[in-house]
């Protein structure tokens, strides 16, 4: 029985040791929550604003759900393609423009940017709409239209 307890303690210790990075934080914490790590460049507000100065060269793809865009705000002109639908929507995305992907804090946007890069699109990077606003950027607040009157629905 003592041997079984000793083996269990050793295995538990090894699990904790391998789950730590060099500075003592877990790898999951270092990645920001354990989601997939993106290779996409996260744009600063200045970089994003510079790219926006030439809208004829850009396509902004917002991968958030419509309720997130409505509640948090977004950018004046963009394609709304939710992250789960991006792979099926590649044929509709112009290849002659630079792409910026948008999510709330750039995590889903980064994964979308990676998908687009692998598919041959020119991607400048990703940006988080909420992060952009917290750093002083201005978002367009989108007001959802009121529901249609019952008489008009029939």
Image (cartoon, grey):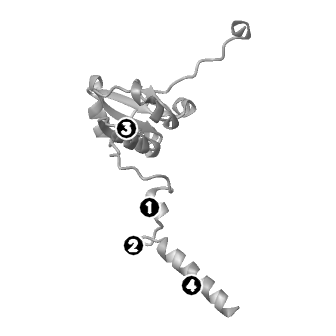
Q: Is residue 18 above or below residue 71?
A: below
Q: Which residue is mark 1?
A: 30
Q: Residues within 10 Å of mark 3 (few under 14, many from 20)?
A: many
Tag count in the figure? 4
Between the residue at mark 1 and the residue at mark 2, the CA separation in whole angstroms equals 11 Å
Quarter of the image where the N terminus is located: bottom right
Local SS, label 1: helix
Q: First in sequence, mark 4 or 1: give its number.
A: 4
Bin the neighbour count of mark 4 within 10 Å (Cα to Cα): few under 14, some 14-19, many 20 and up: few
Residue assigned mark 3: 116
Q: Nearer the viewer, residue 140 or 90?
A: 90
Residue 85: x percent and y percent?
50, 33
Query: What is the secondary structure assignment of the residue under circle 4?
Result: helix
Q: Residue at x 28, y 22 (%)?
A: 56
Dot placed on the residue nearer the N-terminal end, 1 or 2: 2
| Of labels 4 and 1, the one closer to you | 4
Whole-angstrom CA distance, mark 2 to mark 4, is 20 Å
Q: Residue at x 27, y 27 (%)?
A: 53
What secondary structure is found at the residue carrying circle 3? helix
Q: Which of the two labelled residues, at mark 2 and mark 3, occupies the earlier sequence position?
A: 2
Distance in Å between CA atoms under marks 1 and 3 = 25 Å
Marks 3/4: CA–CA distance: 44 Å
Task: Between label 1 and label 3, give the one nearer the viewer.
Answer: 3
State the residue at coordinates (45%, 29%): 89
Identify the mark nearer the N-term, 1 or 3. 1
**Residue that badge 2 annotates:** 22
Q: Which residue does the numbered mark 4 point to in the structure image?
A: 10
In what element is the residue under mark 2? loop
Residue 37 lies, with reference to residue 109, above or below; the image says below
């Amino acid at each position: 029985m003592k041997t079984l307890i000793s083996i269990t303690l050793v295995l538990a210790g090894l699990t904790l040791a391998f789950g730590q990075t060099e500075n003592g934080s877990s790898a999951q914490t270092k990645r920001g929550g354990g989601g997939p790590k993106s290779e996409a460049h996260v744009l600063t507000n200045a970089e994003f604003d510079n790219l926006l100065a030439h809208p004829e060269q850009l396509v902004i793809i917002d991968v958030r759900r419509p309720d997130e865009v409505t509640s948090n705000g977004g950018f004046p002109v963009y394609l709304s393609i939710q992250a789960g639908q991006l792979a099926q929507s590649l044929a509709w995305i112009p290849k002659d423009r630079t792409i910026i992907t948008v999510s709330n804090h750039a995590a889903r946007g980064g994964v979308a940017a990676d998908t687009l890069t692998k598919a041959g699109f020119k991607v400048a990077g990703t940006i988080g709409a909420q992060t952009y606003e917290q750093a002083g950027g201005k978002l367009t607040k989108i007001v959802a239209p009121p529901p249609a009157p019952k008489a008009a629905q029939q």
